[in-house]
Image: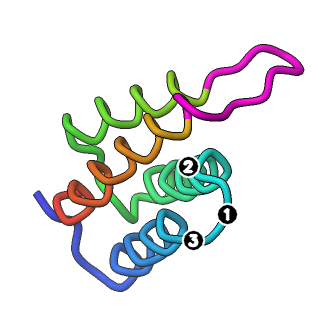
């Protein structure tokens, strides 16, 4: 079920802008994740089962130990997952 309204459209636009932003994919993914969390808490978007799976995968891809720098594989995984999140946004 798609969440309707101006707040939902703004949240979707914000997340898509963060996904497409210039910069490191890992940083973009963290920003998009934070914006999605804020939209879910505010009730602007509704979590779907698929979105929950994608977000769980993204969080695992972004996990790091203290002092560890994420790169290569994490960035590639985040890029792939962000594309899936972008597609799922219309249903959230």
Residue 81 placement: quadrant: top left
Vertical relation: 73 (above or below) 36: above
74 and 29: which is toward the camera: 74
Q: Which residue is mark 1?
A: 23
Q: Which residues are magenta?
A: 63-74
Disc ID at residue 29: 2
Q: Residue furthest bottom?
A: 6
| Residues at marks 2 and 1, CA–CA distance in whole angstroms | 10 Å
Residue at 48%, 63% in the rendered image = 19
**Residue 60: image location, x then y, percent:** 50, 22
Disc ID at residue 21: 3
Residue 72 placement: quadrant: top right
Verify whether residue 69 appears in magenta: yes
Image check: 25 left or right of 85? right
Image check: 40 left or right of 65? left
- Local secondary structure at mark 3: loop
Image check: 92 left or right of 74? left
2 or 1: tag closer to the N-terminus: 1
Q: Residue furthest front?
A: 72
**Residue 10: image location, x then y, percent:** 43, 80
């Amino acid at each position: 079920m798609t969440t309707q309204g101006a707040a939902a459209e703004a949240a979707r636009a914000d997340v898509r802008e963060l996904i497409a932003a210039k910069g490191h994919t890992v940083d973009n993914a963290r920003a998009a994740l934070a914006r999605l969390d804020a939209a879910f808490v505010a009730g602007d978007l509704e979590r779907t089962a698929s979105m929950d799976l994608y977000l769980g995968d993204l969080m695992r891809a972004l996990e790091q130990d203290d002092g560890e720098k994420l790169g290569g594989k994490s960035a590639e995984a985040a890029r792939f997952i962000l594309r899936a999140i972008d597609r799922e946004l219309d249903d959230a």
